[in-house]
Image (cartoon, rainbow, N blue to C red):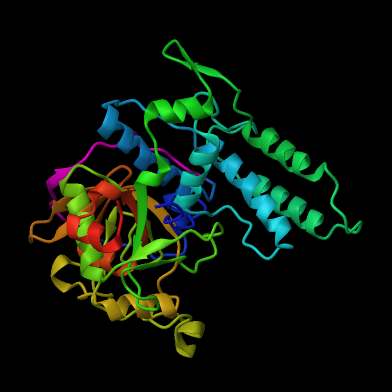
């Protein structure tokens, strides 16, 4: 199904330490995890100071797909090839819409699939995208320069666009991210970006985006209403229990998942855990007393344990989305399932914050958290249970 992809997550704009700056020091209970099912993943990467989690997570997901289908264990695709092409396409649409479109670092899983379909893909070593003098991504200056440029084009006092403006934008992208060569060699074979995509066996039409919200009918598709879904791609809408059944079925049958979620919750900790504590959050800003004399620290907040997580319902998911307590934050890759000492299921999540956290770049995220805070996810269509695939009409 074409255009059934993906309104997914904007990223947190920096690695784990920056993400946690506004949180109080977190103390988490000890967990003992036993792996139930674990599928292959590529090496942990670090998006560092860039809002490109959508790209890191989607390519990590596709690297696992290549491992699954071709048996390779050393695939490393270029994130900045995708970022460059994405910014190019977004600029064209932004100018066509007179600036009435989100133009920022965040994007979606579907964007990655569009780029690969339209332009192909290259290995990381061909286009590392670090032309600005640092060892890790540092995009704030580039993001600002690109936004300033396209706004100047939209506000063009000549009223008529020249034939040069898009070349000017591509010049900025080339200066920061470099340019992929028309041809390159891998293991003695010469490829273009398109032929490399085809050799790897990546078919963007094999992937579907799944979500679960009640403001659209179940068993239909709709473009999730978040700013980073700037391509207006569609996701299939299914009931919550069916959404979870797809995820468990995928992992059990050897597939991984590109997962878009809200990680601004207190239960998503810097120590590699994601849970839903059964406590009500304090109102934003606190009381007037707290404003002037500080918070009462004599009564510590309840710690999240498997035994005292909230029970998540379809109505809770929708309420979080409608009231914006569930936000479009971050893209990651789910690749396995584990159980803690109490028998509670956790999804094993590969992040893109380097070796941050207790588990060195891996998070354990509870079933309850995934039920509650999933915006959408992307998976191979063959990972869907047969009855769900038939009901959606996916061939």
Magenta region, mostly helix, strand or loop?
Answer: loop
Judge whether residue 37 is colored magenta: yes
Magenta residues span: 31-48
Can I make out residue 122 in this image? no
The quarter holding residue 59 reads: top left
Tell me which residue sits at (78%, 41%) in the image: 168
Q: Position of residue 6 (x, y in %)?
A: 43, 57
Q: Residue drawn 54% across and 47% down?
A: 50
Q: Nearer the viewer, residue 351 or 245?
A: 245
Q: Residue at x 41, y 13 (%)?
A: 187
Residue 7, percent from left and from top: 45, 60
Residue 57 percent location from the top left of the image: 40, 46
Extreme residue in the bottom direction = 288
State yes or no: residue 78 in magenta. Answer: no
Quadrant position of residue 365: bottom left
91 left or right of 331 in image: right
* Closest to the observer, 15 or 289: 15
Can residue 359 be seen here? The reply is yes
């Amino acid at each position: 199904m074409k255009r059934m992809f993906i309104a997914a997550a904007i990223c947190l704009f920096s690695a784990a330490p920056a993400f946690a700056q506004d949180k109080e020091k977190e103390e988490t209970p000890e967990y003992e995890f036993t792996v139930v099912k674990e599928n292959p993943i590529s090496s942990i990467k670090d998006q560092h100071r860039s809002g490109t989690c959508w790209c890191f997570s989607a390519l990590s997901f596709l690297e696992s797909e290549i491992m699954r289908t071709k048996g390779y264990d050393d695939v490393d695709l270029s994130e900045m090839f995708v970022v460059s092409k994405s910014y190019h396409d977004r600029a064209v649409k932004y100018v066509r819409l007179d600036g009435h479109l989100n133009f920022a670092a965040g994007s979606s899983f579907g964007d990655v699939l569009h780029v690969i379909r339209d332009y192909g893909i290259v290995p990381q070593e061909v286009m590392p995208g670090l032309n600005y003098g640092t060892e890790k991504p540092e995009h704030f200056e580039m993001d600002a320069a690109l936004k300033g440029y396209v706004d100047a084009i939209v506000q063009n006092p000549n009223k008529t666009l020249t034939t040069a403006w898009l070349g000017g934008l591509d010049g900025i992208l080339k200066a920061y991210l470099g340019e992929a060569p028309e041809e390159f060699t891998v293991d003695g074979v010469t490829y273009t970006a398109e032929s490399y995509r085809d050799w790897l066996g990546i078919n963007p039409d094999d992937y579907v985006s799944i979500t679960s919200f009640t403001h659209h009918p179940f068993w239909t598709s709709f473009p999730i209403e978040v700013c980073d879904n700037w391509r207006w791609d569609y996701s299939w809408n299914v009931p919550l229990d069916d959404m979870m059944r797809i995820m468990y079925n995928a992992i059990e049958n050897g597939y991984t998942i590109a997962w878009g979620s809200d990680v601004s919750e207190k239960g998503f900790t810097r120590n590699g855990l994601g849970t839903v504590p059964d406590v009500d959050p304090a109102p934003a800003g606190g009381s007037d007393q707290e404003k002037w004399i500080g918070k009462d620290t004599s009564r510590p907040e309840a710690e999240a344990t498997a035994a005292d997580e909230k029970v998540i319902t379809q109505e809770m998911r929708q309420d979080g989305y409608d009231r914006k307590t569930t936000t479009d934050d971050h893209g990651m890759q789910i690749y396995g399932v584990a159980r803690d000492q109490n028998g509670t299921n956790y999804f094993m999540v590969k992040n893109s914050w380097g070796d941050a956290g207790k588990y060195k770049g891996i998070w354990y995220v509870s079933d309850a958290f995934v039920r509650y805070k999933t915006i959408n996810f992307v998976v191979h269509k063959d990972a869907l249970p047969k009855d769900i695939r038939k009901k959606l009409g996916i061939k």
